[in-house]
Amino acid sequence: MRLSTKAAAVSAALTAALSFTALGGAASAAAPAAKSAPVTCTAATTKVTVQQVDRPINHLLLKAKNTGTKTCYAYGAPFLRFDEGQAATPWLDASKPQAVVTLEPGQSAYAAIGTSSPEGSEGSVAHKLDVHFSNRAMNGSVGGPAAAKLPQDGVYVDSSAFVTYWQTSAADALTW
């Protein structure tokens, strides 16, 4: 008789444990979802600005601020198109960071734009700049372009122009 009382107690404990686990699983399934997954930064979710800088010479600072509600990834470097240029400004490979720049809402990414050098040729004054954001594979852009306002008198750009990869600080971007 004693054995069946112990067996009943063990059975009741096991049933309670299984019920608790099942309820816990249902409770966690019903819990609100964690933060949404990051998205790729685009012109629709960022504000892009250009600033002339004193140093280094012949450089501009490009800033992209995440104005969206989700974290976004600034992949690679921006694709830049000055005026009606036929080709995007080349990326400076030496500026590639260790990781993708991740922007929480309100945070910014930076890229330096080298506009000209003594070795450059075939230059002109640009008055318009379109900024396209790179896709994850870094072989094309996503979304439409963001229009960045250049200085009123324009910017001289020649064949030596380049843009750095996105950086987490303006100082890092301007080291190139």
Image: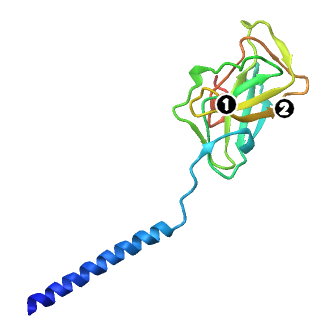
Mark 2 falls on what kind of element? loop
- Quarter of the image for residue 109 reads top right
Residue 149 tag number: 2
22 shown above or below 56 = below
The quarter in which the C terminus is drawn is: top right
- Where is residue 86 drawn, in percent x and y? 76, 17
Mark 1 falls on what kind of element? strand
Which residue is outermost to the right?
153
Dot 1 amino acid type: Ser
Residue 15 tag number: none
Q: Which numbered disc flags the more N-terminal residue, 1 or 2?
A: 1
Dot 2 amino acid type: Lys
Q: Residue at horizontal 74%, vertical 30%? A: 131
Q: Is residue 139 left or right of residue 129?
A: left
Residue 141 tag number: 1
Q: Residue at horizontal 15%, vertical 84%? A: 7
Q: Residue at horizontal 84%, vertical 32%? A: 149
- Where is residue 39 drawn, in percent x and y? 61, 44
Snapshot colouring: rainbow
Tag 1 near tag 2, CB within 8 Å = no
- Quarter of the image for residue 171 reads top right
